[in-house]
Amino acid sequence: MTDSKYFTTTKKGEIFELKAELNSDKKEKKKEAVKKVIASMTVGKDVSALFPDVVNCMQTDNLELKKLVYLYLMNYAKSQPDMAIMAVNTFVKDCEDPNPLIRALAVRTMGCIRVDKITEYLCEPLRKCLKDEDPYVRKTAAVCVAKLHDINAQLVEDQGFLDTLKDLISDSNPMVVANAVAALSEIAESHPSSNLLDLNPQSINKLLTALNECTEWGQIFILDCLANYTPKDDREAQSICERVTPRLSHANSAVVLSAVKVLMKFMEMLSKDLDYYGTLLKKLAPPLVTLLSAEPELQYVALRNINLIVQKRPEILKHEMKVFFVKYNDPIYVKLEKLDIMIRLASQANIAQVLAELKEYATEVDVDFVRKAVRAIGRCAIKVEQSAERCVSTLLDLIQTKVNYVVQEAIVVIKDIFRKYPNKYESVIATLCENLDSLDEPEARAAMIWIVGEYAERIDNADELLESFLEGFHDESTQVQLQLLTAIVKLFLKKPTETQELVQQVLSLATQIGDPSFGAPPAAAVPARLGAPISSGLSDLFDLTSGVGTLSGSYVAPKAVWLPAMKAKGLEISGTFTRQVGSISMDLQLTNKALQVMTDFAIQFNRNSFGLAPAAPLQVHAPLSPNQTVETSLPLNTVGSVMKMEPLNNLQVAVKNNIDVFYFSTLYPLHILFVEDGKMDRQMFLATWKDIPNENEAQFQIRDCALNAETVSSKLQSSNIFTIAKRNVEGQDMLYQSLKLTNGIWVLAELRIQPGNTSFMLSLKCRAPEVSQHVYQAYETILKN
């Protein structure tokens, strides 16, 4: 008879009956009773009243019965901590049982009982099991240390279990090694500052030996551990790569990806001239391609990893374009990922093949996918300049299909191509103008208006076209209204006499809107003398004489992924920091890679070294749909709570939405904190330099920077590092500079530039010397970008 009989309902008084059976003298009856208890527990009945009776059944040699009792114990120990102490003696006794299975079972259960009261009683049995003669017991005990550390980290450290775990890395049994590595990795994750996995060539050799013999999950733990190791030279890196390469042919895709991670990291140290480097590149492609024949979910994980690999080393898969072509039955999330990789792999050699494929996708039935395919054609044009003409031709063919959403997407894309290659493809403007009436999406309308404004002198009826948009000005989205305002002003600058009335009309409409995007309030906005020459009329309003669009600002790093989607239930956050005219911003890009809509976004910063804090709530106006990306700028101030961080520029951020709260850390570049009034008086500079102790002076070398002193001074000034004096000493240009941080700390610098030499010497003096390293990094970043 099967075990299903234990789940059948019984008559009244079942607890009483079970109690009697558990205390029976007959072993078989006792075992049946425990099975009934476990069955009741499994379906959600409360059988905690039987705790003492079940615990009494632990005193048995029957392994099956012991497993059942331990299962019950794990479930109810938390709700009955006082009763659980009764079981301690049995654990201690079982840890010395002649049967290694029972010893391992006892230590495994000990690790799963999360009760503070009894953990200290379990240290001695655990210590014995960690040094047990049987490897099965040792590997189980290794995992138990990680679980115990989660309950009481201090106890584990005091008892010296971490040192024992480190010793187990040298164990003769590969599974013990793998579990020791897994346990140490898990503990290190919760304590990033601790240097638990202190790897050296000897321990790496032991890990690589164990790699060949342990299970697939053991291999994953060891490979992930290897990825955190930095070889001392290229020979050691090559040796490790050679021993890891066989894992690429493993049947488990997780092992393959872990091996790829190790190889990708260690390839950084190998010279590209080595024969082995080329061989390794060739070996990496087949396993990655093989992963794409798995089921869709695994394919997606593989594609996400391949996307990152291709960004770093496109040459690995440059000949494998065909495997990323979309299949008709691929789920949408796989299709979109493949599309992204295709664009990244696009080159002059395969662009014809890629465009033919993308054109085919643009005729599919899935609207979202079609839009992405049309956008992909534009990205190809921008990436591969030689293909731009062919891409424009393909987009024109798609416009001829007259499918509304295809036409609109194509116009948005062509606008981007016009911006990248000005005055090259204007011949297509006539075709675009024919589709003006069919445009109903704000982005497409704004793109068309931009094209008309930019090439107004080549479009005979540009004023009429723009006037047609003005009729419903107040019904348009802000994006279209702003673009219309800009386009009409551009037209006015090109044809002032014919379009004065039109520009007056748009300014009048724009200033009636209460949106701060449009600048001044109505009373101040409309110039009194619009009929006057341009220099007096429009420059009053826009201050054209001071140069539109030439706002000075510090260097802005490209956006980096701060929070990957896999760590935030599908929300991916990329971002960068900017400083423009005294205002600091965090520019964010939020992408929804989940299957549900995201709303109710909010953001908070932890205390940090310079008091950075949001100056306004996080603005994400519309719900974020699946596969949608939104960009937003969060203004920051420096009046938040201050706490010294390690490193100094570390910022801990919490982002909340309707799904959960997510945490991440990022490092902000220090130059966003350099203020505009950081230019020190010469006399003050000399006095301060002398006044700051010599031990506060730090010296750095900036390598590979082929700039002259004037360019250096200009680049640094745009980021608020001011040159106070310059002199030439024995053929060397000496720049004396000052900068001031938002918290009032002054940093003084001496930059030595030898003409013809690409290495500069930088000396920094500051009363807070801990900022010097970060100021040096700011110098490097600004000068090299």
Image (cartoon, rainbow, N blue to C red):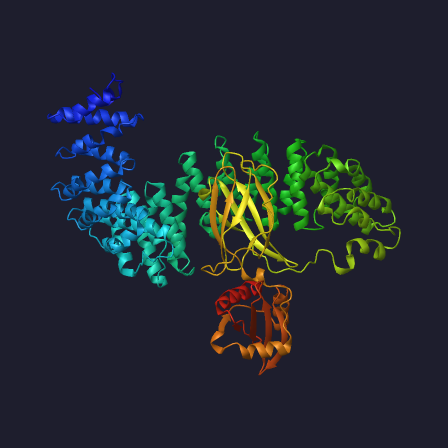
What x and y, as percent, mark residue 585? 60, 53
Compared to residue 633, the image places residue 753 above or below, namely below
Q: Looking at the picture, tell me which residue is in the foreground, 77 or 668.
A: 77
Q: Looking at the picture, tell me which residue is in the foreground, 515 or 356.
A: 515
Viewport quadrant of the C terminus: bottom right
Compared to residue 368, the image places residue 606 above or below, namely below
What x and y, as percent, mark residue 119? 25, 46
Is residue 564 at least partly visible in the picture?
no
Compared to residue 204, the image places residue 753 above or below, namely below
Q: Looking at the picture, tell me which residue is in the foreground, 424 or 457.
A: 457
* Farthest-out residue, top: 11
Q: Is residue 250 left or right of residue 131?
A: right
Residue shown at 30% from the left, 25% from the top: 45
Q: Looking at the picture, tell me which residue is in the foreground, 668 or 293.
A: 668
Q: Is residue 387 left or right of residue 528?
A: left
Q: Is residue 343 left or right of residue 208?
A: right
Residue shown at 54% from the left, 64% from the top: 778
Compared to residue 71, the image places residue 643 above or below, namely below
Q: Is residue 342 left or right of residue 435?
A: left
Viewport quadrant of the N terminus: top left
* Farthest-out residue, front: 82
Q: Quadrant of residue 356?
A: top right
Is residue 518 at least partly visible in the picture?
yes
What x and y, as percent, mark residue 308? 47, 48
* Farthest-out residue, bottom: 730
Residue shown at 40% from the left, 40% from the top: 291
